Image (spheres, rainbow, N blue to C red):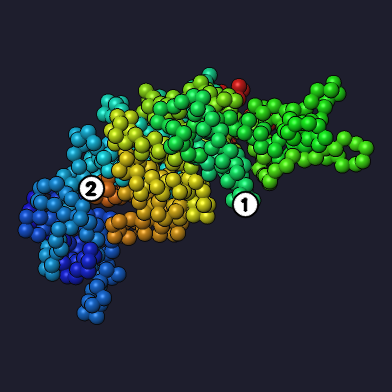
Amino acid sequence: MSSKETYLGDVRDVNGTTVSISLSKESLTGFVYIDGQGYRVGQIGSFVRIPIGFNDLFGIISQVGASAVPESQIENQGHGNRWITIQLIGDGPRNGVFQRGLSQYPTIGDEVHLVSEHELKNIYGQPDKPYFVKLGHISNADSIPALIDVNKLITRHSAVVGTTGSGKSTTVASIMNALSDSEKYPSARIIMLDLHGEYGQALQEKAHIYKISGDATSKLKEKELHIPFWALNFDELCEISFGEFNNEKDKNIVMERVQKYKIESLARFPRKGASADTLSVDSPIPFSIHHLWYELFVEVFGTYYKGRPGKPSDNLAYETDANGNQLKGNPMEGIAPIFKNIVTEAGEEKIFGLPGSLNIGKQLLLLGTKLRIPRYDFIFKPNNWMPDVNGEVAQDLDCLLKNWIGSNKPVTILDLSGVPADILQTTIGALLRLLYEAMFWARNLSQGGRHRPLLVVMEEAHIYLNDDFKGMASKIVQRIVKEGRKYGIGAMIVSQRPSEINPTILSQCGTFFALRLTNAADRNHITSALSDNLDGLTSMLPILRTGEAIILGEAVKLPMRTTIEAPPKNKRPDSQDPIIYDEASLENSQNPGGWGIKMETDPHYDELVETWRSQNPKIDKVKP
């Protein structure tokens, strides 16, 4: 094609990466034909090319018309609509490979040309390269596939952001389907933190699903989720078990007792890599928190008979039941002992409280409650990882990690919908820390992150990565996004409120999948986090269609407005909007229901209460 066909105008002003162009009279018609195909001139977000020698500079149109006139030219311009502002984004040799970044700048008088669809195909990448995955197509060019470079996507971190209903969950499902292609990537490994149980149906053939009180007989074949308390570090254990301490002295006493239990457990059952000299209170060594709790409970609340020979601990004053049995409680079931009240009256056998300086009664009562309540069993009674009184366990952490990141399926979904709200953030922080430390310390092994990188997808990230919460999750995710690249652990942050996410975390994301964002604060947060000067492109975010995304960053050669190819309807996340009035008949509807069909004659609200009490939307009466 001749350069005359694509000619738009000349460079008139250069200010850093911002270039102002005056349009030629020929291009003012607004429509150009190249190789028989029509192109609108001056579309916001479209690309232009500036030939300089054997190289081409590329830019994106960000302003058109009177607002694009350089300040120095406003007085001299009788026709202010003949200007375009572009943002430079990269360059490359003519007919060669496009590269981000600039090796040189344009100068006054350089010609500016329209970029045709044929040139875009050369820029956007080669579909036959195995490190590219296709997510859809360029919105204004159906023949150009939207290709993502997995080398840059995984370890350089990414974020998927969009308002509720913009197609965020479907986009994540499409990305997961592309990355878990067993032919292209036979040893892919992805772990998803699914807070609402949305992705089980979408990825059931490619994923193992772990859920609190998982149902192995269900269609999704859920497995039980267990997070052994002894694998947590001391701060995480305190947050989940004891809550806050009144002072550092009480906390240190508990810390020393945990250390003692771990040393005794290690002495009975030696474990490779750990010794009494190197053991710390944070080391993942099994011990019985039930017996630790019982021992501390006796010390804090116990009473003893003063006048009897022997140590106070040998003469504990237990209450008795109707049959005369001492109410000593049961440590494994979290049942506390009951002690007699203090007696100091004359003529009565004296009963005193045990001597000691512990002031952690409130904390022990809280832990005892959690040991008894079944909803905390996934931490305090973790099945095969449950230690006995001596610290012996049926399975060690290697089995747990193999289930999560070493299974025969590429994706592992950790369904956290059943985690109690009071420990959700700490639980997520503990999970992420376990994964990070496993990848960090195993970095030179075949199971480690350098040889087989791990992608961690964090759904609903604004809930636990919020600046207002000084939680464990935010701290460890900051560490992952800052250092994870070197050890083969990548993060994908998924959120509908990016303005609520810690800015340090967002600024480390190399790739953004930005769907429709109507809130100005959210858009500004994204714009400020981007490495490119692309205000013109991000200004499109409020008007994107559902399922359409602007993909920017390191995983794409050029920022692109993309129509994401959605998975089949039976493979989509369980996050679709209910239909209020469905035009399709009841038999043909994808989501039967709504206000347009008649009510049941006798609705069974007892079933509603059953699902509520069971904390599970899938009861026996619910059809698959």
What residue is shown with label 1?
A: 247
Q: Is residue 10 left or right of residue 342?
A: left
Residue 343: x and y, percent?
86, 39
- Along the polypeptide, which appears first: circle 2 or circle 1? 1
**Residue drawn at the location 67% of the way across and 40% of the way down:** 364
Q: Is residue 266 left or right of residue 368?
A: left
Residue 377: x and y, percent?
60, 30
Residue 598 sits in which quadrant? top right
- Whether residue 41 is visible: no
**Residue drawn at the location 10% of the way across and 55% of the way down:** 55
Residue furthest out toward the right: 347
The one nearer the camera, 359 or 556, is 359
Q: Amino acid at mark 1?
A: Asn
The one nearer the camera, 136 or 412, is 412
Category of crowding for the residue at label 2, using alpha-carbon neighbours closer than 10 angstroms: few (below 14), some (14–19), many (at least 20): many
- Whether residue 132 is visible: yes
